[in-house]
Amino acid sequence: SPYSSLYIQGKSRIEAVLSGEGRYGATITSKELIVDGKNNGTLVSDYLSNAVKITVIGRVYDSRGYYNEATEEITVIPYSRPKILSASGETEVIAKRCDSSGNISDSGTYLKIKARRKYSLVESHNKCQLRYRYKVEGGTYSSWTTILDYSASSDEVVTNALLGGALSVQNTYYVELQAIDDLGESTTTIINVPTDKVYLHKAGSMNSLGIGKYAEEENTVDIAEDLEVIV
């Protein structure tokens, strides 16, 4: 188990170490492990899939066909990978432009991030951290800027990432929200933060036209995602 003496759903397996000796000249011929009524043919079970109390049986057979067994009941602790959810009172996970006071604004040069994490406590052993990062569209992985590293202590985190007005209104950004627990499982959500809204933007140097947003790609007609295109 990742945590000593705990059996965790989807994370733990049972390994049996069985020994014995035959009586009246008989020899030991086989050993088997039965976990929750299942025998996979080895002395190591499959990962425990159900969070219930289960019976574990170890058997040793001799050359006469007789066997002896040991039985133990164990409790499997429920576990599921962490999730990123909308904060209380919100209908979605928020990663949007805002002003220096945290008010959402299409022309904001700051970020407002509002989210909540949900994870399995595993009898208070497990912990889960939230990390927020952002990068400009097209930037490399090394260009990510970390907003909040693995240091969150509350299940609900509201962050006005005051980046000194660093976000250009003419660039699209990607915000990555990641929840990572101590068992090594994680969930990642990436949210697109578009440019400021403009009626029409002609970028002559790129031979591009932006409709409802700033043009960002060469030789393209770049249309804001929230616009309905009618041909």
Image (tube, rainbow, N blue to C red):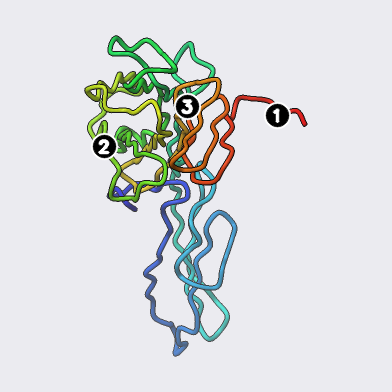
How packed mark 3 is, by other alpha carbons closer than 10 Å (few <14, some 14-19, many 20 or more), is some
Q: How many marks are shown on the rendered structure? A: 3
**Closer to the camera, 48 or 37?**
48
**Element marked by disc 1:** loop
Q: Seen in the image, is 24 located left or right of residue 227? A: left
In this picture, is 43 found above or below 172? below
**Closer to the camera, 143 or 42?**
143
Mark 3 vs mark 1: give the one in front: 1
N-term-proximal mark, 3 vs 1: 3
In this picture, is 109 found above or below 202? above
Residue behind mark 1: 229
**Element marked by disc 3:** strand
In this picture, is 197 found above or below 33? above
Residue 160, position as x, y percentages in the image: 30, 18
N-term-proximal mark, 1 vs 2: 2
Real-space CA distance between mark 3 and mark 1, rounded to the nearest whole angstrom: 31 Å
**Element marked by disc 2:** strand
Amino acid on which disc 1 is placed: Val
Dividing the image into 4 quarters, which one contains the C terminus?
top right
Residue 135, position as x, y percentages in the image: 34, 39
Q: Can residue 78 be seen in this view?
A: no
Residue 85, numbered circle: 3
Q: Can residue 215 be seen in this view?
A: yes
Real-space CA distance between mark 2 and mark 3, rounded to the nearest whole angstrom: 20 Å
N-term-proximal mark, 2 vs 3: 3
Residue 30, position as x, y percentages in the image: 50, 80
Residue 146, numbered circle: 2
Amino acid on which disc 2 is placed: Thr
